[in-house]
Image (tube, grey):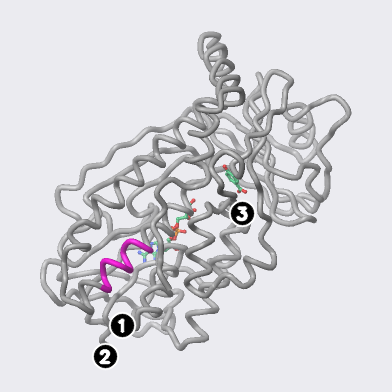
Amino acid sequence: MTVTSRTRVGIVGAGPAGLMLSVLLARRGIESVIVESRTREYCEARQRAGMLEAGTVAALRAAGVGKRLDAEGLEHDGIYLQFAGERQHVNFRELVGRTVTIYAQTEIVKDLIADRLAAGGVIEFSASSVAVSGIESAAPVLSYTDSAGVPHEVACDVIAGCDGFHGIARALVPGLSAYERTYPYAWLGILADAGPSTDELIYSRHPDGFALYSMRSPEVSRLYLQVPADESLDAWSDDRIWAELQKRFALPGWSVATGQITDKSITPMRSFVAGPMRHGRLFLAGDAAHIVPPCGAKGLNLAVGDAIVMASALSALLLDGSATLADAYSDTCLRRAWRATQFSYFMTSMTHVLPNDPFDDLAQLAQLRYVTSSPAAATSLAENYSGYESPKFES
Ligand code: APR
Ligand code: PHB
């Protein structure tokens, strides 16, 4: 027997976009149900990004989920860009008056899940056969089978497709246009029990490939290496990874602190933007609509931004009967998504090395010298990295 129920907003996916949306809607007194195909443990353990724009930090605080972020987040004034044997600092605080904060996406996911569950919110983990129907009517339905095998149908006012790049929601938008760029390289990422030997992130362009030095805490480093797109993890022993990191970050009298590697993965690099992000009563957010390559750390920030814009649009639609913000939703989000897409493309192309391309090598070095010496160019980088036109959530 199918169990039927009702909520205002049915949300597909318990990633940062879906969870943040549910929390923001709750703050406006709007009920929602989240349906997620994975287990809670899986969602809370997935290693993802970790750099938050100033606006993302402000929104998490305004939503009342900033307590652990404030206690454990690492605030950074800027980043280092390393190339041709130099390491130059770009100071966002001085250039644009904003900082960025290291706080892992997994921790945000844990905080948001805990907040929803403590408030009696519904998150159906381990759901299967998730489907959406009736998005062109005023009463769309979210259906799924729960972890005990019981089928459910939830009648909703609106459905939010926050189900990531491989979800089901995007395909329900008729006439969707998608724009894509793939890159001939990937990132090999590690998590290591090693205190970072740098105070802020280092983006290093080395003739043998890009490397990024990031971190999770004073005890844990997160490091990435540019590798070929079709690379296998089997080719990378721990010793080879450390040797390559030492080489790509090398500076006289300085070295990368090593430690036990606790996680190792390869992430493909892709830019993808699809729109419109709304059809009828279905709204898309986050990776369901757009993917950026990780260089520049925009993915998580875009997902949170979409959730903020959607929460305002749905509050106006469902509480005041005003469709103006809902009608503007897709354009508002796509405008920011394209800015972030262009910036991520810029950061990636400036720092990642193509084999046997001396023209590109010299053009990259010219660009790196420019953004680290011209205040105008550095300000543009700082403005984009720390968050350009971030949407605000008023608590
Ligand atoms: N039914 C239910 N849930 C689904 C389905 C489905 N058919 N398909 C996917 N999901 C779930 C996934 O298991 C995942 O938990 O939707 C969630 C989507 O979460 P994310 O992929 O984290 O996407 P999003 O919330 O948009 O956050 C984007 O995550 O991938 C990173 O770098 C990216 O930082 C960015 C952020
Ligand atoms: C990370 O900490 O995982 C991270 C930081 C900055 C990036 C990408 C990833 O540009």
Residue of label 3: 101
Quick check: can you spot residue 188? yes
Work out which quarter of the rendered image holds the N terminus and state it. Answer: bottom left
Membership of 313 in magenta stretch: yes
| Ligand 1 lies in quarter | bottom left
**Pointer 1 and pointer 2: residues touching (CB < 8 Å)?**
yes
Residue at the far top in the pictured view? 358
Residue 133 locus on image (x, y percent): 18, 70
- Above or below 66: residue 124: below
Secondary structure category for the residue under label 2: loop
Q: Name the main secondary structure of what is drawn in magenta.
A: helix
Residue 13 locus on image (x, y percent): 40, 66
Secondary structure category for the residue under label 3: strand
Residue 128 locus on image (x, y percent): 37, 72
Residue of label 2: 1
Going by the numbered disc 1, the residue's amino acid type is Pro
Label 2 packing within 10 angstroms: few (<14), some (14-19), many (20+): few
Q: Nearer the viewer, residue 356 or 300?
A: 300
Secondary structure category for the residue under label 1: strand
Q: Does the beta carbon of the residue at mark 2 sit less than 8 Å from ligand 1?
A: no
Residue at point 55% right, 78% down?
Answer: 114
Q: Give the mark, 1 or 2, whose residue is nearer the N terminus.
A: 2
Residue 236 locus on image (x, y percent): 70, 37
